[in-house]
Amino acid sequence: MNLKELYQEIILEHGKNPRNLRKTDNFTRDAKGNNPLCGDNVHIYLKLNENNKVEDISFEGSGCAITMASASIMTDLVRGKEEKEVKEIVTDFLDMIKEKDELSTELLNEDEKTKLMCLSGVKQYPMRVKCATLSWHTLTSAMNNSQEIASTED
Amino acid sequence: MNIDQIKKEFPIFDNKVQNNDLVYLDSANSSQKPRIVIDRIYDFYSKEFSNVGRSVHYLAVAATNLYEQTRTSVQKYINASDKNEIVFTKGATEAINLVANTFGQKYLDEGDEVLITELEHHSNYVPWHFLRKSKKINIEFAEVNEQGEVTLEEIKKKITDKTKIICVTHLSNVTGAILPIKEIVTLAHSKDIPVLVDGCQGAPHLKLDMQDLDCDFYAISGHKMYGPTGIGVLYAKKKWLEDLPPYQGGGGMIREVKKKGISYGELPNKYEAGTMATAQVIAFNESIKFLEKIGIENIEKHEKELLDYAVDLLGKNNSVNIIGNPKNKGGVISFTIEGIHPHDIATILDEDGVAIRAGHHCCQILHEKLGLPATARASFGVYNTKDDIDQLNKSINNCKKIFNLK
């Protein structure tokens, strides 16, 4: 049953009570992203310390359960990671959503990977892939300190 | 009227969609096609194809006649006074762009106002927006009220001595509000202001009489009228089509082309440059015949019954919030469910074969006013039944269950 794979308990729970839904004080980088066709939008705030580690990450915005859950899980997982590591995790996640069956990064433990794999249900719903990837593209923009609004519309 | 019989004329319902019977509630987006329309395209290409209006061989003449027959059918269907008031376009969007471009060129200058409404689809806003830059015009918005309507009084309030054209939807694709077009036209004409009506949702569901409505322009979308994609109609009063400049240049729209000057063709050729969507225009005649066979009054009545049934049923469903409550409403219900995003609703309903639309329905101005980034929308066509509405309600309940709502 595809629907149950898409709307797993963990997604519904994160969608309903998103973690890190706030604005980081004294953030050092930020970026906005939107899915113009859906009206979903996120604003990611990032605070990197002197060692380029993510001291805090948060987001504001609104969207469907998938969009909100994805941003919620993502912000939980990248806290404490170095800039380089964050980029590796983002690439790994986007590759998995696009084509790979599994995550291959060694920067996440099995529990964390299981959480992320809950989002793989969108693969069967091409129209919903962009919901799962919006916050990740926006995080990339924030890391690059891009002033452009991230969009999943290519 | 026997809906089961009518539904059998639509091949799409013969097949299961993901193992479910299709419950198609997205006709405001695009309607399904009856077999006669589909077959007509096949037959035309297989046995009768030629370009129209150019060559003199047998096929060309026959195709030209067929093409012109659709024009006459449309003229009669909407009761226009002249067949040359029917211009074929690629859709309602192109029809509105045609008017915005040519009327804008000739009659709009810096500081002039175009009055539209907050209900407008992007296709009746963006073409006018282009003129903000090129001509420095202003666009004014008649506001939507609590019921999701735009009233005659509101239009009256927004007319100024700078208003040069009023552009309104006939039937809102979000709230379903049917606007008092005839009254708006009378008011506008008393001040010498022409009126353009976006008839995308009007034409498939309401009886049309251009001479009675008396509007200056009326834009029609073929694919929402059980017709093929790629075909629309601009109805315009003859005086405008004769007066306004051509829209696109190319073959078919000219009289004589010299190095030093060009003269343009007569109506309707003046506005039909290049090879048109010939097969689609010819098949569109079958859509008109289909609508005439059932009778638009019967369709209106049937869709009203469905609407009343749906408003009642969904109205009783906890946590379903119907957007707008217009006194005069067509077969469109936009709704939200507290705690479930419209895209999640649409995906979950889809699993049961229930096809609805979620998003801003190309009406971001209205959604901003409503304070909602998106809504879910169920819209009806001639083939829908009360069983479809029951299934919609059942699937909404399933949705609530998945999200642990009561």
Image (cartoon, coloured by chain):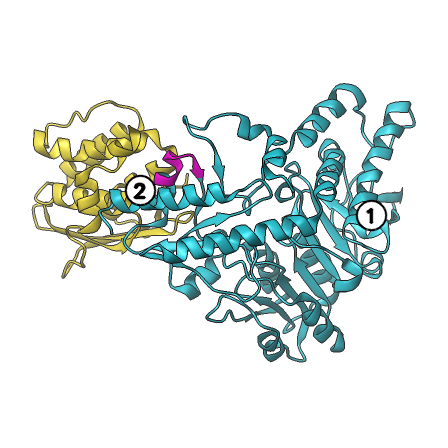
Chain colours: A yellow, B cyan
- Tell me if B34 is positioned left or right of B283 in this view: left
- The picture places residue B127, in percent across and down from the top left corner, at 61, 56
Q: Mark 2, chain letter?
A: B
Please tell me whether residue B344 is drawn above or below residue A124 in the rendered image: below
Between B315 and B18, the one lying in front of the other is B315
Look at the numbered disc 1 and give the secondary structure of its residue. Answer: helix
> Please, what is the three-letter code of the amino acid marked with disc 1?
Lys
- The picture places residue B154, in percent across and down from the top left corner, at 57, 76
Q: Is residue B352 magenta?
A: yes
- Give the label on residue B270, or none: 1
- The picture places residue B122, in percent across and down from the top left corner, at 54, 55
Where does the magenta region start and end? B348-354
Picture residue at 46% right of the left edge, 70% below the top: B146
- Tell me if B25 is positioned left or right of B228 in this view: left
Q: Is residue A143 visible?
A: no
Pointer 2 or 1: first along the chain? 1
Please tell me whether residue A28 is drawn above or below residue B229 in the rendered image: below
- The picture places residue B125, in percent across and down from the top left corner, at 57, 59
Q: Is residue B316 magenta?
A: no
Picture residue at 30% right of the left edge, 56% below the top: B338
Judging by the rendered image, the residue that carries numbered circle 2 is B398
Between B134 and B58, the one lying in front of the other is B58
Packing grade of label 2 (10 A; few <14, some 14-19, many >=20) is some
